[in-house]
């Protein structure tokens, strides 16, 4: 209270933050003229005709931190991920004569720059950006698995309880069908329930089995409802104990970017919180009588604290990730130990431009797995992009995006297509191999009828969503190149930026047509680059698998089959690529390894790739079993 009983006094402050260009009286930094940013997504294009003059006028001085922004030109590309928040790759624009081998005699990775013969983009560094909660250790993995298992068992029990409720339906056919499903599914449900609830569940099931078929409908429904009450009360105590344990668990305050925590800012932690919320909602609105529907009342406030916690966790992740990327682009590293602990220290020259993957038009289901695309496209990517733009503007750093379809399916160095794989964990095959196999490895062993003893630590297992990217390095069998999948995707964005890449260079959709009575494929011209490449071209084939380009004849080719839906609509479902015979999707391997680099029907293209890589990895594992038997 103020003097004389006056009320509270509030001050409304408005702050205007100036970036360095504003402070110098400049509208924007000089390097902004090198890039053209188009649309709401800031799709990035390089003004190649201005690069040479800029490099001459602003030679690289190698200054660390933000002080070096006005010298040289560096671009940091970012591939957002789930296992780790982001993967980055930094390239510097330099003259060709600066290409020198490193101390080990290895030539640097570089990309030619379109329309500028004496300049190249040289790779300087690549790394994974991890937020708190994204580290992996035996202890952390066990804690994460334990808490997720506890929640999953409660969710599973609720599912079985829901099946039991259906067994009390007034409809006899539905009742019998539900009872049959329940008794069949409960046979292998041991690992999906807590031990005490399993005992109670089996006891109630035995009672009902004795009654089934020997009593009237009313008696049966009453017996089922009584069993539901018993199991509901039992599970109610479990849910209360579980909630107390979750609430009273160790709350580790994350300071700075300390990473060795169970949850932290990881996607896994947010997913775990979302699962909690969904389970509690299902539990709270569970109908204990067949046909009963319980809905939240208008204006009800269900799990408000948990919902707010999830929203804050998402916001915190976005801000921390954007901040981490900005500091990394400016060349600062967060010191965890030693001198300068807890501070940002300038260690690298800064990047003037940050290049993100553009996911708003990510429609190809045979690129990244759908589960990964969905999580990235929902809130994470969109939120990071907006937050990053706001923070970058204060530091005079530009932000743009690049078309990212298939960036995870082609090697950034060789251009060859590849497969994402996981490595066999050493813990699963070490010693007596008593630890259970991960679901993806168990499925692989089961699908190909392998013996667990044939596996070795670090064996590559094709899974489509793995951490490692494997592609053919030459035409020789078994000559494979292995890189980190996310780092490869980040470098692919750089390759596309400096080459002014268009998707039609590796993928083109065509309509069936005819010329001089012969069937041909006529490419769709959907972009300026596609028009340059294919406006007067057609594709011919002898086997309807491999196609060859040639110029159109003097008489214009006639389209005989064309889809009546748009190109965008055709990209939505994967099956639509070949579901109709009216159009065909062709792919080609820029490295010339798969089908000698010829245009190939999409399904056959991926089949040839899988046969080459997956077939070799599978044969390598099976040969061990043969060798052991011979010995």
Image (tube, rainbow, N blue to C red):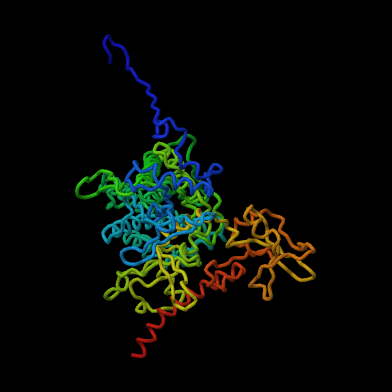
**Which percent across, then down, holds residue 305?**
37, 39
Residue 289, position as x, y percentages in the image: 48, 50
Q: Based on the displayed image, in which of its 4 quarters is residue 466 positioned? A: bottom left
Considering depth in this image, is 447 or 254 the residue closer to the camera? Answer: 254
340 versus 485 height, above or below? above
Q: Nearer the viewer, residue 427 or 61?
A: 61
Quarter of the image for the N terminus: give it.
top left
Quadrant of the drawing holding the C terminus: bottom left
Extreme-left residue of the structure: 338
Q: Is residue 271 above or below residue 452?
A: above
Q: Is residue 544 visible?
A: yes
**How many labels, in total?**
0
Q: Is residue 439 left or right of residue 263?
A: right
Residue 219 in view of the camera: no
Name the image quarter holding residue 460. bottom left
Extreme residue in the bottom direction: 630
Who's the residue at 44% across and 77% down the image?
478
Q: Position of residue 608 (x, y in %)?
A: 55, 73
Residue sitting at x 69%, y 70%: 540
| Towards the viewer: 163 or 387 | 387
Height in image: 550 above or below 229?
below
- In front of the other: 506 or 248: 506
Q: Position of residue 191 (x, y in %)?
A: 36, 64
């Amino acid at each position: 209270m103020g003097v004389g009983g006056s009320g509270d006094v509030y001050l409304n402050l408005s702050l205007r933050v100036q970036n360095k260009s504003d402070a110098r009286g400049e509208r924007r930094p000089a390097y902004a003229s090198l890039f053209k940013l188009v649309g709401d997504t800031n799709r990035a294009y390089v003004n190649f005709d201005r690069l040479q003059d800029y490099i001459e006028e602003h030679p690289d001085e190698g200054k660390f931190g933000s002080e070096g922004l006005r010298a040289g030109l560096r671009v940091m590309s970012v591939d957002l991920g789930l296992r780790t928040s982001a993967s980055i790759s930094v390239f510097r624009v330099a003259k060709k004569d600066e290409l020198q081998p490193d101390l080990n005699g290895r030539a640097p990775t570089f990309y030619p720059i379109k329309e500028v013969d004496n300049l190249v983009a040289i790779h300087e560094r690549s790394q994974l950006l991890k937020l708190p909660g994204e580290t992996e250790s035996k202890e952390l993995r066990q804690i994460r698995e334990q808490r997720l298992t506890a929640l999953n068992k409660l969710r599973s029990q609720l599912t079985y309880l829901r099946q039991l409720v259906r067994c009390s339906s007034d409809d006899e056919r539905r009742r019998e069908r539900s009872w049959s499903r329940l008794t069949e599914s409960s046979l292998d449900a041991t690992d999906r329930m807590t031990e005490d609830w399993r005992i109670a569940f089996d006891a109630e099931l035995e009672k009902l089995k004795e009654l089934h078929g020997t009593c009237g409908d009313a008696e049966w429904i009453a017996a089922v409802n009584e069993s539901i009450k018993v199991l509901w009360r039992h599970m109610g105590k479990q849910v209360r104990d579980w909630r107390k344990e979750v609430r009273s668990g160790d709350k580790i305050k994350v300071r700075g970017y300390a990473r060795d925590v169970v949850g932290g800012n990881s996607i896994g932690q947010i997913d775990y919180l979302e699962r909690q919320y969904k389970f509690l909602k299902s539990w709270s609105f569970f109908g204990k009588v067949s046909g009963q529907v319980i809905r939240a009342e208008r204006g009800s406030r269900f799990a408000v604290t948990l919902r707010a916690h999830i929203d804050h966790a998402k916001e915190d992740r976005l801000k921390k990730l954007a901040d981490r990327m900005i500091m990394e682009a400016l060349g600062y590293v967060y010191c965890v130990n030693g001198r300068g602990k807890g501070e940002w220290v300038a260690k690298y020259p800064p990047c003037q431009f940050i290049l993100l993957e553009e996911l708003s038009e990510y429609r190809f289901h045979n690129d990244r797995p759908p589960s990964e695309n969905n999580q990235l496209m929902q809130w994470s990517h969109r939120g990071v992009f907006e937050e990053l733009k706001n923070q970058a503007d204060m530091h005079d750093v530009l932000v743009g995006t690049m078309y990212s379809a298939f960036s995870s399916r082609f090697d950034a160095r060789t251009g060859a297509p590849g497969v994402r794989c996981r490595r066999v964990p050493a813990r699963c095959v070490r010693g007596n191999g008593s630890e259970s196999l991960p679901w993806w490895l168990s499925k692989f062993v089961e699908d190909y009828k392998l013996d667990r003893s044939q596996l070795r630590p670090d064996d590559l297992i094709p899974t489509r969503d793995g951490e490692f990217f494997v592609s053919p390095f030459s035409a020789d069998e078994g000559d494979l190149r292995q890189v980190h999948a996310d780092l490869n995707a980040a470098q692919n964005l750089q390759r596309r930026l400096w080459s002014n890449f268009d998707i039609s260079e590796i993928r083109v959709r065509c309509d069936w047509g005819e010329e001089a009575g012969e069937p041909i494929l006529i490419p769709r011209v959907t972009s300026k680059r596609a028009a340059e490449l294919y406006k007067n071209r057609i594709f011919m084939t002898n086997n309807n698998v491999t196609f060859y380009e040639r110029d159109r004849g003097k008489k214009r080719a006639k389209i005989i089959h064309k889809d009546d839906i748009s190109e965008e609509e055709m990209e939505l479902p994967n099956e639509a690529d070949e579901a109709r015979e009216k159009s065909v999707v062709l792919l080609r391997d820029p490295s010339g390894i798969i089908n000698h680099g010829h245009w190939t029907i999409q399904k056959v293209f991926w089949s040839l790739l899988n046969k080459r890589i997956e077939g070799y990895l599978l044969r390598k594992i099976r040969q061990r079993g043969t060798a052991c038997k011979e010995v």
